[in-house]
C-alpha cells in the first residue's frame, strides 16, 4: 500500500499533467489482458499521449481545478484516463483499441474544457490528424505557385519552340 506522501506526490504529478493537456478521455479497462494493456499504452505513447490506470479518489483530487474536473468527480468502478495535447490522434488510437479489444470502453471525454459523449469521441477519431491538415494546407498553398511557375515556363518554352521553328524555316535574315 502506498504511503500518504506517495499518493500526494502522485496526485500532484497527475494534476500537473492534466493542467498541461487539452484532451482527457476516461475509459474502463476491466477485462483486458496485460498484453492488450501494454499494446494500449504503447499506442497512446506513440500518439504523443499518456495512459494511466487511476484510483477514483486520486483522479478526483488531481482533476480539481483542471478542465477535466467535472468528468473526474464521483467516479466509480475501474477507470483509466488517457490524455494528450492532440485530441484527434488520441481519439483515433483509442477508437482503434476499442474496436480490437471489446472489454476496453469509453466512458467520457473532455476536449478544450468541453465534455464529450462517447459518440462525439468516435466522431473526433474520424477527423484528419493535425499532420494531415497541415499537409493539405501546404498543398493548397503551393498549388497556385506551381500553376504560375508552369505557366511562366510555358511562355519561355513556347518562345523557344517558335524561334526554333523560325530558324528551321529560315525566317530570319542572315
Image: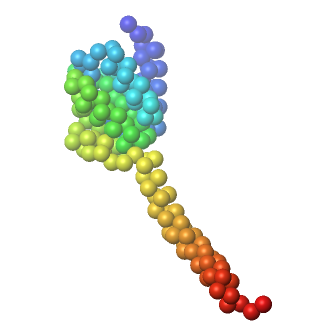
Q: Is residue 164 above or below residue 62?
A: below
Residue visible at 48% across and 59% down? 139
Residue 59, image x, y percentages:
34, 26
Q: Residue furthest right?
A: 174
Report if residue 103 is visible in the image. yes
Residue visible at 44% across and 56% down? 136
Q: Is residue 83 above or below residue 56?
A: below
> Left of 155 or right of it: where is 66?
left
Residue 18, image x, y percentages:
42, 34
Q: Nearer the viewer, residue 150 or 161?
A: 161
Residue 70, by quadrant, is top left
Quadrant location, the C terminus? bottom right
Quadrant location, the N terminus? top left
Q: Nearer the viewer, residue 144 or 27?
A: 144
Q: Residue furthest front?
A: 169
Q: Is residue 150 above or below residue 96?
A: below
> Left of 165 or right of it: where is 106?
left
Residue 38, by quadrant, is top left
Q: Nearer the viewer, residue 150 or 1?
A: 150
Amino acid at each position: 500500500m502506498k504511503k500518504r506522501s506517495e499518493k500526494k506526490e502522485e496526485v500532484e504529478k497527475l494534476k500537473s499533467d492534466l493542467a498541461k493537456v487539452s484532451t482527457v478521455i476516461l475509459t474502463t479497462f476491466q477485462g483486458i489482458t496485460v498484453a492488450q494493456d501494454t499494446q494500449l499504452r504503447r499506442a497512446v505513447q506513440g500518439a504523443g499521449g499518456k495512459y494511466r490506470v487511476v484510483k477514483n479518489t486520486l483522479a478526483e483530487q488531481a482533476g480539481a481545478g483542471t478542465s477535466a474536473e467535472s468528468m473526474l468527480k464521483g467516479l466509480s468502478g475501474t477507470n483509466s484516463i488517457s490524455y494528450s495535447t492532440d485530441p484527434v490522434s488520441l481519439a483515433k488510437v483509442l477508437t482503434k483499441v476499442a474496436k480490437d479489444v471489446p472489454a476496453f470502453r469509453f466512458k467520457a471525454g473532455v476536449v478544450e474544457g468541453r465534455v464529450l459523449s462517447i459518440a462525439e469521441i468516435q466522431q473526433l477519431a474520424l477527423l484528419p490528424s493535425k499532420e494531415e491538415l497541415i499537409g493539405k494546407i501546404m498543398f493548397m498553398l503551393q498549388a497556385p505557385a506551381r500553376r504560375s511557375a508552369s505557366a511562366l515556363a510555358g511562355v519561355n518554352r513556347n518562345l523557344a519552340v517558335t524561334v526554333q521553328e523560325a530558324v528551321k524555316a529560315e525566317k530570319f535574315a542572315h
